[in-house]
Structure formats: C-alpha cells, structure tokens
Image: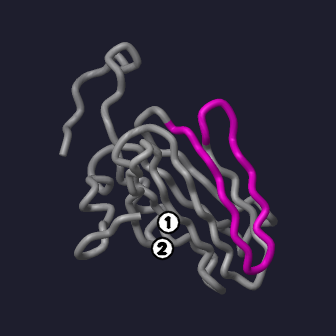
Amino acid sequence: MTITGSPRTLSDLGLDRQNHGTLGRLLNSGPVAEAEDGPDGRMRGRLRVVPDQMVWDPAVLYLPHGGRLDLDIVNDDSSTHTVLLPSNGDKQFLALPVRSRGKAHLELDGPGCYWFSSVIGNDEGSGLTGAIVVGGEVAEQARLDRPEQPRP
C-alpha cells in the first residue's frame, strides 16, 4: 500500500458525497488506504484486524482501477477471525487463527464498492466489516438508463 504525505480519507477519494454517503457513515471507524500497483500488473494491499477493537485496518481499501489484487491479511487480535472477500465469480473465505496471517488473490474487474467481513459469530454485534472500492468508469454498455448524476 502506498500512502504519501497525510493518509487518504473518504473525502479525498470523493466517497463522502452524493451517492456515496452510506459508505462514509458505515465505515467511519477505521482508516483508508490505497492499493499499490506492482510491476507485474497486479495490485497489492494489506488488511489487519486491530487487537481488541473489532475493526479492520484499513476499513476501506481503494483500488484506482479494476484488476488483480494480492492481499496480505493479518490477525493481530487475541481471538480467531475469518474473512469473506469478494472476487469475480465467487467469494473467497480465509480462516485467521489467533495472531496469524494469510494471503488472498482477488480479481475485481469492475468499478464499485465491494464489501468484506469477518463471519465468525457476530463480533460484538456489528461484525468486522470493510470495503474495497474500485475506481474507474463503468463500460458504456453496462450503464443504467437514468438521468445524469452530479459528480465530484
């Protein structure tokens, strides 16, 4: 992940404006990070379960474009967690025993907001929930027939 200068915020990415407000309200308890483009064309990112806080770090992982994403996932908590991740075609599931790490390889080729979460129990009533936000434009043939929307 690359974060230069001050950390990215939902506002920096335009995710707190019209049509994006829900994301800003639901995932306001963790930081935002941006995946790094690798020389092989794959993006790389890292997710971490923060000890004793029931949040992901980052809560929002931003991908500037669709493609392949290699995720390093770390459970620094003293409880076992899992992660259910989005990917084209099917979701991926990864078990994360206490203080362990795992890797996931995802493909997210379209722009949008993709949710991920821990699915063990109810994690203190709210679960560990986060989002992978893929930037870019929707292909012309996939756009909805609706009036133009304000854009940031």
Q: Is residue 131 left or right of residue 15?
A: right
Element under label 2? loop
Which residue is painted at 48% across and 68% down in the image? Answer: 58
Callout 1 amino acid: Ala
Specify whether residue 75 is painted magenta: no
Quadrant containing the N terminus is: bottom left
Residue 100 picture quarter: bottom right
Q: Is residue 113 left or right of residue 88?
A: left
10 Å crowding of disc 1: few (<14), some (14-19), many (20+): many
Q: Is residue 97 left or right of residue 133?
A: right
Which residue is painted at 48% across and 61% down in the image? Answer: 26
Which residue is painted at 69% across and 70% down in the image? Answer: 101
Distance CA(mark 1)–CA(mark 2): 7 Å
- Region rendered in magenta: 87-108
The residue lying toward the viewer, choosing from 126 and 83, is 83
Residue 9 picture quarter: bottom left
Is mark 1 in CB contact (under 8 Å) with mark 2? Answer: yes
Q: Is residue 140 left or right of residue 130?
A: left
Numbered badge on residue 10? none
Q: Earlier in the sequence, mark 1 or mark 2?
A: 2
Which residue is the extreme one toward the front? Answer: 39
Q: Which residue is mark 2?
A: 29
| Residue 74: x %, y % from top left | 64, 71
Residue 118 picture quarter: bottom right
The residue lying toward the viewer, choosing from 32 and 123, is 32
| Residue 41: x %, y % from top left | 42, 42
Numbered badge on residue 59? 1
Which residue is painted at 61% across and 44% down in the image? Answer: 86
Callout 2 amino acid: Ser
Q: Nearer the viewer, mark 1 or mark 2?
A: 1
